Amino acid sequence: MRYLTAGETHGPQLTAIIEGLPSNMKIDFDELNYQLHRRQLGYGRGRRMQIEKDTAKIVGGVRHGRTTGAPVAIVVENKDWENWSHVMNVEPVEGSEEELRRVHRPRPGHADLNGGLKYQLKDLRNVLERSSARETAVRVAVGAIARQFLAEFGIKIAGQVLRIGEIEAKRHDLPIDEIIRITEESPVRVVDKEAEAKMIEYIDKVKAEGDSIGGVVEVIVEGVPVGLGSHVQYDRKLDARIAMAVVSINAFKGVEFGIGFEAGKLPGSQVHDEILYSEEKGFHRKTNRLGGFEGGMTNGEPIIVRGVMKPIPTLLKPLASVDIDTKEPFKAQVERTDSCAVPAASVVMEHVVAWEVAKAFMEKFGGDSMEEIRANYNNYRKLLEMY
């Protein structure tokens, strides 16, 4: 399976084409749009979320509610397009630099300057329009399709915020359904209610100062069978592919599995997961410190992956920059922004992880139809039981 996206943050729409989905997969359109809705929530979001009410329109590859095996085309319209139709028109247009909203003062932390240098673009809007996190809307739509595919095989996905700035949530050991229930009711997608109140207060403080703040989010995938991914080549290791997907999310700068970087300061006896066997569970691990992976393959335990998001670089009190025309110092131009997008980023991370797991699942149990994949999966489960 693979997908491509296209579109700009102030263009008419975002588009994705998914190739490799099997036929006869039922699509729940309400669930698809619910996932897009979740991405728009979260304390700290900016005015853009008051304009956009994202819905996904499937315009190819689905008939009468089921996939046909052909590429699936998804469109997410930008409601703000009507205010940008002149500035972002694909045809040549007339207008002053001010009317066309030319950007010539790159923002620190954004792709503006290096994108302009790489592509020889004198209007940095051509860079920021594509590098904007708005593109994650259509990636969530793609991941929502993958999520529905995984649900057919009993695989569940949850996301939660663990930290916003200096406020950290307490650790817990709740079932995945309970994590989903509690975080869906939380404006910062956190389980710890005491931390929730402190996070909201902290975001308000940061916003009042014209600043932004990042944090840490965690995604849990439960019900994953043993053996997704492979140890035989670097680019077939599923944890490596998930790590790439997570860091590809706008503003994400790091990723870890299980106990993560803590493993670097502990002896092996406190890192590795001892192997147990029972008639009921078969082979399983006593702990899950490695986050569901050994040798680049799933080991049957839940996948536990965390990502760290830096503060959004567009600030209401802009940092120093240099005008690309005059080479003189200026304060960077300000675009519309969020003070904290960590709760929304948690939703995005759920869906990029869902895609990678679904892709690996298809590689392992691949077929052209859901019926063929289900037969392959059930046969594999029997083989595991007889091992």
Image (tube, rainbow, N blue to C red):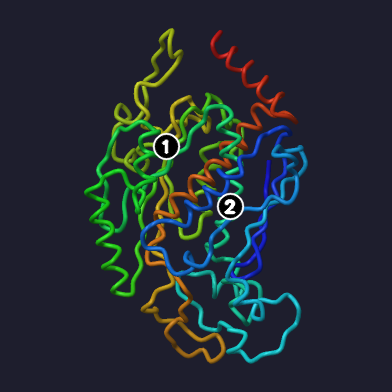
Pick the quarter of the image with the C terminus. top right
Question: What residue does disc 1 label?
Answer: 304
Residue under the point 72% across and 85% down:
93
Q: Which amino acid does label 1 sit on?
A: Ile
Instruction: For label 1, count other residues whose C-alpha is less than 10 Å away and answer few (under 14), some (14-19) or many (20+).
Output: many
Q: Residue 280 vs residue 267: left or right? A: right
Q: Quadrant of residue 317?
A: bottom left
Q: What residue type is labelled 2?
A: Arg
Q: How far across and how far down the image is residue 258, in percent?
A: 38, 36
- Vertical placement of residue 121 versus 289, above or below: below
Q: Quadrant of residue 137?
A: bottom right
- Vertical placement of residue 9 versus 39, above or below: below
Instruction: For label 2, count other residues whose C-alpha is less than 10 Å away and answer few (under 14), some (14-19) or many (20+).
Output: many
Camera-side residue: 88 or 233? 88
Distance from disc 1 to disc 2, alpha carbons, whole Å, reads 21 Å
Q: Residue 195 vs residue 323: left or right? A: left
**Mark 1: which secondary structure?**
strand
| Sooner in the amino-acid sequence: mark 1 or mark 2 | 2
Question: What residue does disc 2 label?
Answer: 139
- Vertical placement of residue 108 versus 267, above or below: below
Q: How far across and how far down the image is residue 42, in percent?
A: 39, 56
Q: How far across and how far down the image is residue 70, in percent?
A: 77, 41
